[in-house]
Amino acid sequence: MSDNKTNTPLVEIKNLKKYFDINTGMFTSKPLKAVDDVSFTINKGETLGLVGESGCGKSTVGRTILQLYKPTAGEVIYDGKLLKSKADIAEYRKKSTMVFQDPYSSLNPRMTVSDIIAEPLDIHKMYKNEEERKEKVLQLLSKVGLNSEHAARYAHEFSGGQRQRIGIARALAINPEFIVCDEPVSALDVSIQAQVINMFSEFQQELGLTYLFIAHDLLVVRHISNRIAVMYLGKLVELTDAATIYEHPLHPYSKALMSAVPLPDPKIARLNNRIPLSGDIPSPLNAPSGCPFRTRCEYACERCAEEMPEFREVEKGHFVACHRVEEIN
Amino acid sequence: MSLLEVKNLQTSFFTDAGEVKAVNGISFNLERGKVLGIVGESGSGKSVTAYSIMQILASTGKIVGGSIKLDGEELVGAGEKTMRKVRGNKISIIFQDPMTSLNPTHTIGHQIMEAIVLHTDRNKKEAYNRAVEMLRLVNINEPEKRMKQYPHELSGGMRQRVVIAMALACEPDILIADEPTTALDVTIQAQILDLMTSLQKELGMAIIMITHDLGVVAQLCDEVIVMYAGSICEQGSADEIFYNPRHEYTKGLMNSIPTTNTFGQKLRPITGTPIDLLNMPEGCPFAPRCDAAMKICIKSRAEHMLINEDHMAACWMNVKKGIEEGTIEISEKNNEEEEN
């Protein structure tokens, strides 16, 4: 959710690929194409939602953009500058950061909260003396709704929601411009989830942050995002405005995905307008030829098995990767 | 007589820090062939309620009071011998994580047949046929092949189908589903929920659906129970709970979920964090987080009040509303509360 949204690109991803080598025997290995030729742009001040089912590569996209994984191929352009050398990446790391899904495993149990929050500051040497470090930590704590007495405690003394607040404080420590939020609310209870979502919105307004918001809860993504990208088996299948993707999805997979969301409204739920999707997502090690979705798609034809559909702009700002998109809509 | 009658059930865990009243006096009935949803956040006691019915509590947990009647037969204190005949036979349970509820060292077939051989007088051959039939019923392709496979060879959605097949093999009267789709993706969740709905219609069993997802409740349930801190705050038909919530906690829950048209708006979360079950307040357990809390809420717990024939809520706000609308007479006792 952002009113500060601009049309200047902050992060541009071009043909990003990330393959992992999986051992299939003692001496043989096979590439697992976790992210396969993905391109998109995130504008300054906007929230781009990235949705898809488990194993589709959405978290890998987030991590590769942040250069936590070295991309197999492709370019990441940040603020008009191509990330190439180590120095570029070091500079980039002072502006970009991440909030993780699991507030339990992402905080070191042996460190105090104050050390956890100050760690990015330590690494980037962003304070002059001990006094300033302490002051910054206290500022960050109060920003996320915790207080100074929490600073000396350890992570296990906090509830899930409070831990996620600590994770957010750590992310904000370096005054970032760009934050990758990887399922930041999915481990939280509904009432706490709403508190954290509101916090993300407030910080975006206040600090002009840009988010890549990765989640599988489609209602949460809809609530917070300006635009939404849908991934399937390492590829983008659709990208458009958040409202359009719900009301007027074009790709058969997005249609099924959107219709599967259980809405908290019994009258709508009973209508059961779902588009059923049979079977499971194929293993990325044995991805189907051509369009990755064809094995589960009711519109699949011969051409779908032969060539990978191009990710093209069908309507203004509405990208879809489907050969038959015009016919079926 | 209802199929399952739970009256004033109290389950506590005895820990080093003291007694944790995980379920604190709840009552409800489950009718044959109905789907009852139990919603609540973590620690609200929804799973403990299910485990109490099945009597599969951890060793520190104990049912300390109340009664659970299945078809008129008392289960509390009935002993392990009776419970063994009930579990898997009359009442089945499926859990959140299908991987941990299947044994990784046995084949799928072995695990489904186990329940059948144990509870019916079918021989091994007949049990095998029944197991294959069950796998087919839950839409698993090539069931004969799957019978020989191990759990790790199946995907998450398929495993949950196997668990459902296993739970339904003995045609139970009640199926308890404890967050059955939480670990699954949305499209797989939709498949499983559709499967449960169609099986429920076909086999006519009753389902107790335990979940934190109000969307799942809206889709599946006839009746809904909302739990907070071990107590029921509101109970009624799904339509009543969703369109006419009468407990401040239920209202808070409804407001904190994003919907398709909340973009650009602030969500209205419930403030604070759930209460510590070791230090339960005297009054309404939700009062410390409730924006509308009055003095009386902190002092005493509201009784369950009948809103209409299929709706009950335990919230003083309803009494306040009743007094304002003149539907409740102000007696001596209520005077004090009106001043607040």
Image (spheres, coloured by chain):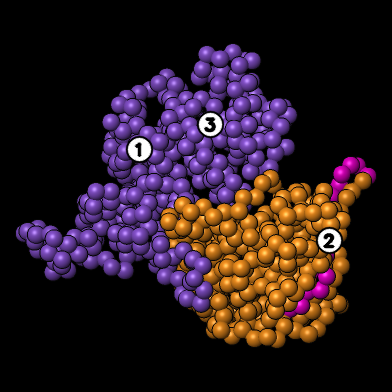
Chain colours: A orange, B purple
- Residue B111 against residue B316 in the figure, above or below: above
For the residue pair A328 and B290, the one nearer the viewer reads as A328
Under circle 1, the secondary element is strand
The magenta segment? A11-27
Write down the chain letter for disc 1. Answer: B
Q: Chain of mark 3?
A: B
Which numbered disc, 1 or 3, marks the residue that appears first in the sequence?
A: 1
Contact, CB < 8 Å: mark 1 with mark 3? no
Which residue bears the numbered disc 2?
Answer: A308
Could you say which disc has been placed on residue B167 in the image?
A: 3
Which amino acid type is marked by label 2? Met
* Mark 2 and mark 3 residues within 8 Å of each other at the beta carbon: no
Most extreme residue toward the left is B332
* Residue at which label 1 appears: B30
Callout 2: residue from which chain?
A
Quarter of the image for residue A261 reads: bottom right
